[in-house]
Amino acid sequence: MKVRGIRGAITVTEDTEKAIITATTKLLNEMIAANGLEEDNVASVTFSLTPDLNSAFPAVAARELGWDNVALFCCQELAINDALDKCIRILIHYNTDKKLGELNHIYLKDAKKLRPDLAEEGVGKNGE
């Protein structure tokens, strides 16, 4: 098995605890479903927030999903001019036999702008 990175991102419209946790939960659930993830094979998860989001730790969403034994880490994105605002990103380090091309990276809402090539392939295809 190799450790592979599975990426995802979502945007929120406001900097509130509810908005951050709700969006992070939605993104995590989509990443889990799209890749058939099992907690036991998750090595760690990194959550990042753009500097305009500071009302909650997005890792709380993973704990609320029952990921109590997974190493979770939150950090702040660099403040880059013209970067996407109010964006939550997730990087899941996952132990798997899948090839890189078999992984599904999920970009929802305005975060689709970050990787339009993946959004066009139908990733996050629930209409968001």
Image: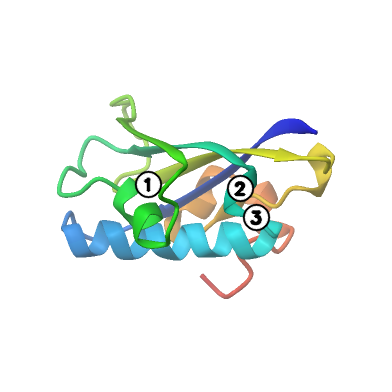
Residue under the point 69% across and 34% down: 4
Mark 1 or mark 2, earlier in chain: 2
Secondary-structure class at tag 3: loop
Residue that mark 3 sits on: 37
Asked whether residue 103 is in view, the answer is yes
Rendering quarter of residue 110: bottom left
In the image, taking residue 79 as reference, residue 45 lies left or right, namely right
Residue 88 is marked as 1
Residue under the point 83% across and 40% down: 97
In the image, residue 57 lies at what x, y percent? 25, 45
In the image, residue 22 lies at what x, y percent? 32, 65
- Marks 1 and 3 sit apart, C-alpha to C-alpha, by 20 Å
| Disc 3 to disc 2: CB gap under 8 Å | no
In the image, taking residue 114 as reference, residue 120 lies left or right, namely right
Kind of residue indicated by mark 2: Asp
- Marks 1 and 2 sit apart, C-alpha to C-alpha, by 24 Å
Kind of residue indicated by mark 1: Ile
Secondary-structure class at tag 2: helix
Question: Between 33 and 118, which is closer to the camera in this rendering?
Answer: 33
In the image, taking residue 26 as reference, residue 80 lies left or right, namely left
Kind of residue indicated by mark 3: Leu
- Marks 3 and 2 sit apart, C-alpha to C-alpha, by 9 Å
Query: Where, quadrant-wise, is the N terminus in this rendering?
Result: top right
In the image, residue 85 lies at what x, y percent? 30, 45
Callout 1 crowding tier (Cα within 10 Å): few <14, some 14–19, many ≥20: many
Mark 1 or mark 3, earlier in chain: 3
In the image, residue 32 lies at what x, y percent? 59, 59
Question: Between 85 and 82, which is closer to the camera in this rendering?
Answer: 85
Residue that mark 2 sits on: 40
Rendering quarter of residue 107: bottom right
